[in-house]
Image (tube, helix red, strand yellow):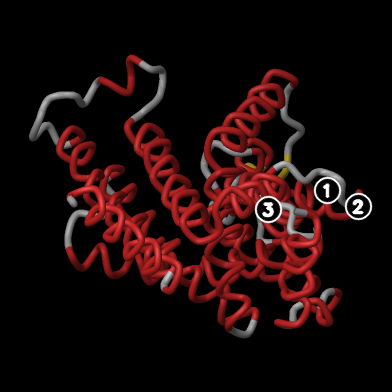
Amino acid sequence: METRVAEQQETGLKALVQRYPIAAFLLLALGSVYLLSIIPILMQYDVIPGKNFPARLGIDMERFSAAVLTILLFGSALLVTYLCGGRRDVRQLFRRIVRWRVSIGWWLAAVLALPLLTVMIAVLLGDSAVVPSGSVLWREVLGIAIAFVLINLWEEAAWAGFLQTRLERRHNFFLAALLTGIPFAAIHMPLQVITGQVRSAVDFAVGFALLMVLVIFVRSFYGMVLRGAANSLLLVGLSHTMFNRSNNTDGIAADILRGGDSRQIAALLATVVLVVVLGLVLRKKLSRSYRRELDDAEQGAS
């Protein structure tokens, strides 16, 4: 009798997830991240012991927390994908994660477009550019590889592969990017608490608003790469990595640029330029009908 009741409850939960997959994903992802982020935040501010634990692993608290965030995020997407479509949908998701056979033009767009444009715009804004040494370039290649393989690929498997893809089936392309950007920004806010950028409710609100300005364009860019590269999450994850390495203080753009503080503004402007250019190039592929074509092709390959 107890087994039968448990099976009925499981069936009821599965049916609920199938009916509201986006809500289920957001509840799992945001709920688990915000709940578990309390621990590293308390560690970082010495409320509980463990502040030095990430250092024993060779990373800081921010990177440690980002790794945990990624596990929770991708795990949520994978669980909801399985409950909605079983092993078939999970296989489809992983095929998109490893899809590398796309045109060389999209590889160049994913790898080079943002850092090159960022450096060019920063120079126009008054910075100077220097040629980095071999050791700096090697460190950068290693940083790109680690961030891509351990964080950004799986992050975009959840955001682009699960959430943005589903929202594109229901909404205009740019509205889907905006709606994806809201939880995308929200889930990064605990990291700003850990780094000390956010210390009050006002800081939280301002930080979230500023992040939303950025992610509106960033998520549109990632969505365009997704459309142009035939649903390749591999290239979307790589685009994410290259944006971070163009925008962050320890990335390739920071290694090249000297004399000013326009790198982050340049990275944002570079993203805006790419969104405009790619939007014009891909205008016929940004429709909901083309999203259905891509999804039908995935179904046919299964």
Asked whether 280 or 15 is in front, the reply is 15
Q: Where in the figure is residue 299, as x and y percent of width and height?
A: 74, 62
Q: Which residue is mark 1?
A: 107
For label 2, the SS is loop
Residue for point 36% across, 61% down: 11
Earlier sequence position, callout 3 versus callout 2:
2
Q: Which residue is mark 3?
A: 236
Point out which mark residue 173 bears.
none
Contact (Cβ within 8 Å) of mark 3 with mark 1: no
For label 3, the SS is helix
What whole-number distance in Å separates the C-alpha atoms at marks 3 and 2? Answer: 14 Å
Residue at the extreme left: 47
Earlier sequence position, callout 3 versus callout 1:
1
For label 1, the SS is helix
**Above or below for 193 versus 150:** below
Q: Which residue is mark 2?
A: 103
Asked whether 68 or 49 is in front, the reply is 68
Asked whether 36 or 264 is in front, the reply is 36
Three-letter amino acid code at the position of disc 1: Trp
Q: Where in the figure is residue 101, as x and y percent of width and height?
A: 86, 46
**Above or below for 68 versus 177:** above
